[in-house]
Image: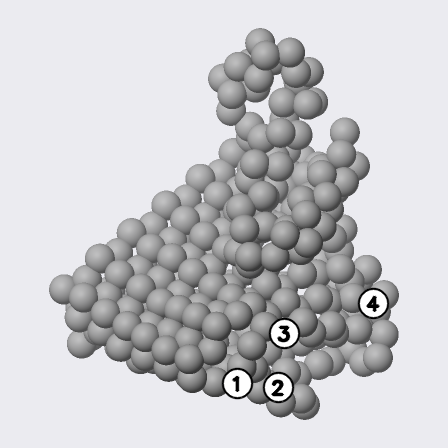
Amino acid sequence: MSLITVDRSKKITVNSNTGSACHLDIEVRERTSGKVVITLVGEKELKIDLNVKVASDSNISFLTINHVDNDVELNEKFDINSDSSVAVAHADFTEYRSLYKADYQLSGQGAQLAVQTASLSRSRKVFNQDTFHQAGNTTAHVNNYGVVMSNGYTDMVVRNTIVQGAHHSSTHQASRLLTYDKTSIGKILPVLYIYDNEVEASHAASLGQPDEDQIYYLETRGLTQKEAISLIVKGYLMPVTRIVSDREIASALEQEIETKVQQND
């Protein structure tokens, strides 16, 4: 077990070769502004438990990048206190199985959460996310974007809950899966549990292969069909590169997305 106190930007590397299980406790101090980048590396299976407590009046982003050449299970819990704004992002373009379990608690008045997930699957990837509005005037936007390549499988279960008494809260979720061909399998289950009347809530989900009209339009501009599909696929994944204001990290992710998509051509 490792306790990490955060009062500025920080980079953390977890290497599966040093142990198949890892537990990280992160405490973000009051009025902290910055970004935390967690990179998972190694060749062995990895199970990581991540517990994050964010004190009040903070503005912080978390980006987890999976580079493990094996199966990964990530269990993360966030406790977000009053008037703090937290962005959580996941970038997973590996060829191995991944399981993501998330529990986001908006515990204090005015807490804000933004989630941005980008995944590219050639095997099996599962996302199981729960967001709980425990206090009033809290806001959550949960966005999941995935591309299921040939013979891949992706399953997304997204639940947002507003408890009774959490007046004037706002919760929204959008999950979109692009299936590359007929061998790709995708599933989305959006769920809203609303126990208070003075709130806003919405969910959106889309699942299917690239739009033929979009492909045709791009072909009329001189692209081949493969180039057109690749461009659409990259468009699904690129938003995750903007979650942290770090040009070096964003460029590396953009290059990784480009490389992984080309591998299917």
Q: Earlier in the sequence, mark 4 or mark 3?
A: 3
Say the numbered circle drawn on residue 42: 4
Say few, some or many: other residues with alpha carbon within 10 Å of mark 1 (under 14 / 14 to 19 / 20 or more). Answer: some
Q: Residue at x 58, y 30 (%)?
A: 232
- Of circles 1 and 4, the one toward us is 1
Nearest to the observer: residue 151 or residue 60: 60
Dots 2 and 1: beta carbons under 8 Å? yes
Q: Earlier in the sequence, mark 3 or mark 1?
A: 3
Measure how far apart labels 4 and 3 are at the Cα level.
Answer: 20 Å
Q: Secondary structure at mark 3?
A: strand
Q: Residue at x 51, y 24 (%)?
A: 211
Q: Please state which amino acid type lies under the numbered disc 4.
A: Gly
- Horizontal arrangement in the rendering, residue 145 relative to residue 74 (left or right): left
Say the numbered circle drawn on residue 27: 1
Q: Which residue is mark 3?
A: 10
The answer to whether residue 92 is visible is: no
How far from the left and from the top, in percent, is residue 120? 65, 46
Measure how far apart labels 2 and 1 are at the Cα level.
Answer: 6 Å
Say the numbered circle drawn on residue 97: none
Q: Is residue 187 above or below residue 49?
A: above
Q: Earlier in the sequence, mark 2 or mark 1?
A: 2
Dots 3 and 2: beta carbons under 8 Å? yes
